[in-house]
Image: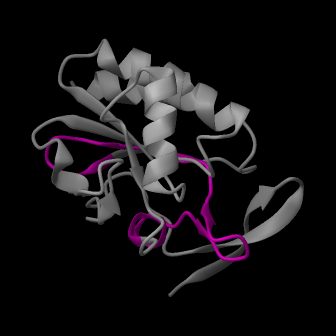
Amino acid sequence: MNERPGGTTFQGRPMTLLGETLNVGDRAPDFTAVDPDMGTVGLSWAPETVRVLCSVPSVDTPVCDRQTRVLGSEIAALPGAELLTLSVDLPFAQRRWCGASGLEGIIASDHRELSFGRAYGVAVKELRLLSRALFVVDAEDTVRHVQYVAASDGPADHEAVLRAVRDCL
């Protein structure tokens, strides 16, 4: 497993990311995560659509909560696009978050295997969390946009993601 020391920071401290860095044009790797109802979800959860894969440390933090809510509403307004936010929060906590936010079907947990985190290069070795990142995958499973956020507790560029989604539709 590739290790990238200093691949992100968390609360100002450098952290090591596990996995390869993805680039635009790469084939999107499959993964196995757990949905809030304990079912499995992977890259094929929304076939033949443009998928936004949103990696966050925890939906129970203000920045992650806001990012998921904003992208959830923006992506929902784009026919042919779907959002999936992934964190290592337990599915039970994610279900509680979905109930409180009113957003369903847009979240999954990578707590079991870190399958997504390792495949997309966002698993934080020191904390066993996911770093903040956004990936746009087209209907043919090609990565069309990659955004690894330098500070895991900092904001992402939502507008760049939305432009990439619109370009794929």
Outermost bottom residue: 1
Residue pictured at 30% horizontal, 65% vertical: 31
Residue pictured at 62% horizontal, 82% vertical: 3
Count of numbered badges drawn on the protein: 0
Residue pictured at 41% horizontal, 16% vertical: 74
Above or below 83: residue 142 = below
Give x and y (percent) for residue 162.
Answer: 42, 23
Q: Answer whether residue 46 is visible to the viewer in this image.
A: yes
Asked if the stretch drawn in magenta spans residue 48, the answer is no
Relative side of 63 to 56, left or right: right
In which image quadrant can residue 106 be found?
A: top left
Colouring scheme applied when the structure was drawn: one colour
Above or below 58: residue 159 = above
In which image quadrant can residue 85 be found?
A: top left
In which image quadrant can residue 15 be found?
A: bottom right
Nearer to me, 42 or 16: 42
Outermost top residue: 77
Give x and y (percent) for residue 145.
Answer: 41, 42
Relative side of 153 to 45, left or right: right
- The magenta span reads 115-143
User: Is the C terminus in the top left, top right, bottom left or bottom right quadrant?
Assistant: top left
Nearer to me, 82 or 24: 82
Nearer to me, 139 or 89: 89
Give x and y (percent) for residue 60.
Answer: 64, 40
Nearer to me, 166 or 61: 61
Relative side of 107 to 61, left or right: left
Outermost right residue: 12
Residue pictured at 34% horizontal, 61% vertical: 33
Above or below 90: residue 104 = above
Relative side of 97 to 72, left or right: right
Give x and y (percent) for residue 36.
Answer: 36, 47
